Amino acid sequence: MAHYAFLNNNNIVTEVIVGKDEDDNEDLPEGFDSWEEWYGDYRGQTCKRTSYNTVGNSHTLDGTPFRGNYAGIGYVYDEDEDAFYQQQPFPSWSLDENYVWQPPIPYPDDDEFYIWNENAYNGDNTEGWELVNDSE
């Protein structure tokens, strides 16, 4: 079983389906070199295979990572990198080499729960994470 992502004209994932394994070419219609190509032609959209077991450019079962991350609806497909990743969550965050967005300052390591506050981040690496008060 393989998974396939359909892309709109802006390379944003609009749908992910389960389909034929890429190695199962016995039923592949004539004139097509891959199921990825066939699904794309059938739907009239760009189609890219995606790996359910790839997260942060690592394979969860110690296999070979494929296209950065498993695609989800709303994810971006980067043609140059041949990778899927989430849309940028905040303007100050940057995409790392594993196709995961990173904040400009690390998440606090104190067993508390925080949310990122872009308005509080002033670029000097002292603000941004806001403690969520769960005692209310």
Image (spheres, grey):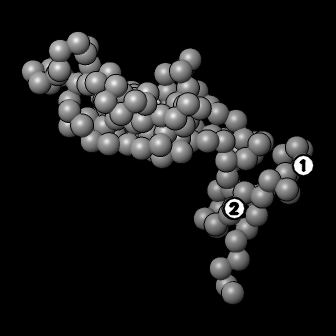
The residue lying at 67 percent from left, 52 percent from top is 107
Q: Residues within 10 Å of mark 2 (few under 14, many from 20)?
A: few
Report whether 111 appears left or right of 124. left
Viewer can see residue 60: no
Q: Which residue is mark 1?
A: 122
| Mark closer to the chain start, 2 or 1 | 2
Residue located farthest toward the left when viewing the structure as drawn: 26
Q: Residues within 10 Å of mark 1 (few under 14, many from 20)?
A: few
**Of residues 124 and 118, the one drawn nearer to the viewer in this rendering:** 118
> Disc 2 versus disc 1: distance between alpha carbons?
16 Å
Location of the C terminus by quadrant is: bottom right
User: x%, y% of residue 74?
Assistant: 53, 45
Viewer can see residue 41: yes
User: x%, y% of residue 133?
Assistant: 71, 77
The residue lying at 17 percent from left, 20 percent from top is 29
Q: Which residue is mark 2?
A: 115
User: x%, y% of residue 59?
Assistant: 36, 34
The residue lying at 67 percent from left, 84 percent from top is 135
Location of the N terminus by quadrant is: top left
Q: Quadrant of residue 115?
A: bottom right
Label 1 SS = loop
- Check the image and report above or below for 117 versus 112: above
